[in-house]
Amino acid sequence: MLKDMTIGQYYPGNSLIHRLDPRVKLLGTLVFIISLFTFSSISAYALATVAVLTVVAVSRVPLRYILKGLKPIFILMLITILFNLFMTPGTAVLQIWKLKMTEEGIRFAIHMAVRLTYLIIGSSILTFTTTPNSLTDGLESGLGWMNRLHVPVHEIAMMMSIALRFIPILMDETDKIMRAQEARGADFQSGGVFHRVKAMVPLLVPLFVSAFRRANDLALAMEARGYHGGAGRTKMKPLVYHRKDWIAFLVMAGYVAAQILLRIFVKI
Amino acid sequence: MKSSDRRSIIEGHDLTYEYLHYDDDGNVDASYRALKGVSLDVKEGQFIAILGHNGSGKSTLARQLNALLVPSGGTLFVDGLDTREEKNVGAIRQAAGMVFQNPDNQIIASVVEEDAGFGPENMGVPTKEIWERVRKALKAVGMWEYRESSPNRLSGGQKQRVAIAGVIAMKPKCIVLDEPTAMLDPGGRAEVIRTVRELNRTDGITVILITHYMEEVIYADRVLVMDEGAVVMSGTPREVFSNVRALKEIRLDVPFVTELADRLKERGVPLPDGILTVEELTEELEKIRHGDQNRAS
Amino acid sequence: MEIRIEHLNYIYGLGTSYEKKALDDISLTIRSGEFIGIIGHTGSGKSTLIQHLNGLNRASSGQIFVDGKNIYEDGYPMRQLRFRVGLVFQYPEYQIFETTVLKDICFGPKNQGLSAEEAEGRARAAMRMVGLDEHYEGKSPFELSGGQKRRVAIAGILAMNPEVLVLDEPTAGLDPKGRDDILGVLKQLHRESGITVVLVSHSMEDVADYASRIIVLDKGKVLYDDIPAKVFSHVEELESIGLAAPQVTYVMRALRGKGWDVSQDVTTQAEAADEILEVLRKAGVKC
């Protein structure tokens, strides 16, 4: 089940998008998402569509693969749309029993659907083309200014990258412990909610014990290799902006300018 | 060069260590002496093996060598630095690198090359030099081709080699390996030991190997046997394995061949002490067979 | 209880990019009361195979018959099979979760539907089998040594009264003392209760002294299935797949190479010593 999730995973490649500085991609994703919520006309969505499709094409991540990532949140989206369809007050178009579908509701639901879909696609392009490590590096360096506000940016980034390294290990371990308890007759599938929660104890206790042991070991190993926080540390892969990154910034600025122009001059 | 002429890299004198257990008010309510007066002197370039079963104090000793723990009593100098001095800790960890038992729990980064670079990054080594060190270290352990892999895709033996590379990249004088093969299969075990021996022979790195596998210590210059927090035997592998009975008493293994030779000796076959390999045993047995035949004829 | 496996295949991740054939046409029979060693390299399929024996894994194709009944037939009591074939996983101490040793061992029998008293009775009997006396009952399992924890975990399976005990690398990570203790427990258990034991290991030394039959797996296939002496005679083949014969085989081969008339079928140290002494006596050496 968890293995089918494509969202949030890295899709190995060497395209221009893959090679961009993670800070550029982070900012780009942010700009794109903000634009979805500030510019909401048909022409604005059309432009966003062109932008997304272009980026996908350049990244060489199959569109099919990206769309697969939408599957797990399909239900969530359906609920949001239905909720908006029937709960928005306004002129009734259709009435089913006590539920009124309104014109405003339809419009709002379409907006939500488009925004959510694009939001997911936009952020999955980021994760598909950026390794978890360079993503954390990007966050660390991009948010470096927050250090002055006493936010421990390096430590948070280190925690993120360690978490990313250990997630697959702990998932494997969960599977193993589950099987081991099933061999002792544990039943994780049947029964009511209360029964199921209780059945999780033989899984969760060993999992926590193991996670703590690993954390302990890891802390010791990091200390043994001279780790003492972010101060005085050098970088093996420091982030440097190249020409392509500056060009990407320009493209981004162009996109925002085009959206503003559309808003002013095109009224649909 | 005789080993006594060489510089000492580790000098421990009458080391003791106590684990303290505190009650809720922060007072010591129980203590456990894990080390009881251990002395050792390791020269640069030596290959030392420390044997002992779990709870013998060998891991506690290992952690002293990297200043992860400091002695409760006695003194310990690593590369001439007193481990009790707070200001020496950084230099000591750089001089004596440490490899642990569980391969999964000591790899920090999600890419092999980045893990090898973790130590140098902490030391503040300039970027260009980090790459040089990482390349050298990964090549030394034969993991250069895997530099862009995720550690999760490697075998246990490969992961331990990456961990060793992570230590080598810090340019240590000495590597302390705390049961690095306990969780590996025979293939992985052989891989790791081969790598360690190679580093010792070609780069002259001092090796302190803590293990409970006898086959791994045959090549050591010196073997220390620990039991209940003390060094109970010390000498060349041959000397140590001559005491088959004493080793069995503290429930340690003896190499199969050594044990077989001992059994034969008990039954009157005049074999010498401390036979370690199949070749030695067959040679000695041949001598006995032919020697006596010649005398008979 | 007899387990008959016929043409078993198991494929991982069917239809994905990492599809892999983990078991390839395995056929073998485990008879009641046997002590079998399954040997193979990491990734040879040995752990995957034993998880089929109690139904945790379902074969991609092929059949398994337990006492003549096909376990893949509709309505087969699969849950009962879990209790009849006790499976001890690798590093089983990682599955311990209760506050006391006794409670943890009771988990299996309670899942079988036994009353608290019955379960405790079973748990106490299992503790005796693995050599843990009463004063361990109320202890927290997390305060025990590695070897003791493992015994608790094995007792947790034994308390279900399985007819077959399957253990995946029961000595992994233990020191020589812990290893000998566990192997001693298994040997005694087999001798005294007649339980069928299937021991999975990558160490020939572990199984050479105990097993009456050894199955060697390589790349998901059965390479050898024979008595130990016969299996060990294939030294070169074993080495080519990353395994080794036990040391005793190497000693005997070296001696034969020098013209000694010693048997090749020797598997233990005592037998080896006897053979060597025999040759020396024949050669006129007084010993």
Image (cartoon, rainbow, N blue to C red):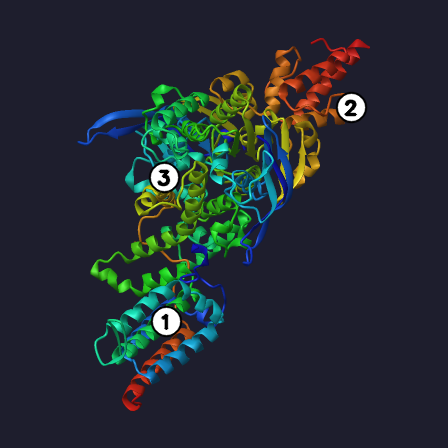
Which callout, 1 or 3, points at the residue further toward the start of the chain?
1
Q: Nearer the viewer, mark 3 or mark 2?
A: 3
Whether residue A103 is visible here, answered yes or no, is yes
Instruction: Name the residue tied to disc 1.
Output: A117
**Residue corresponding to mark 2:** C259
1 and 2 marks on the same chain: no
Q: Secondary structure at mark 1?
A: helix
Q: Residue at x 60, y 35 (%)?
A: C68
Chain of residue at mark 1: A
Chain ID for label 2?
Answer: C
Q: Amino acid at mark 2?
A: Gly
Q: Which residue is mark 3?
A: A202
**Disc 1 marks which amino acid?**
Thr
The image shows residue C216, relative to residue B161, as above or below, that is: above
Residue extending farthest to the bottom is A265
Residue at the far left: name it: B25
Marks 1 and 2 close (CB-CB < 8 Å): no
Q: Residues within 10 Å of mark 2 (few under 14, many from 20)?
A: few
Secondary element at image label 3:
helix
Q: CA distance from mark 1 to mark 2?
A: 80 Å
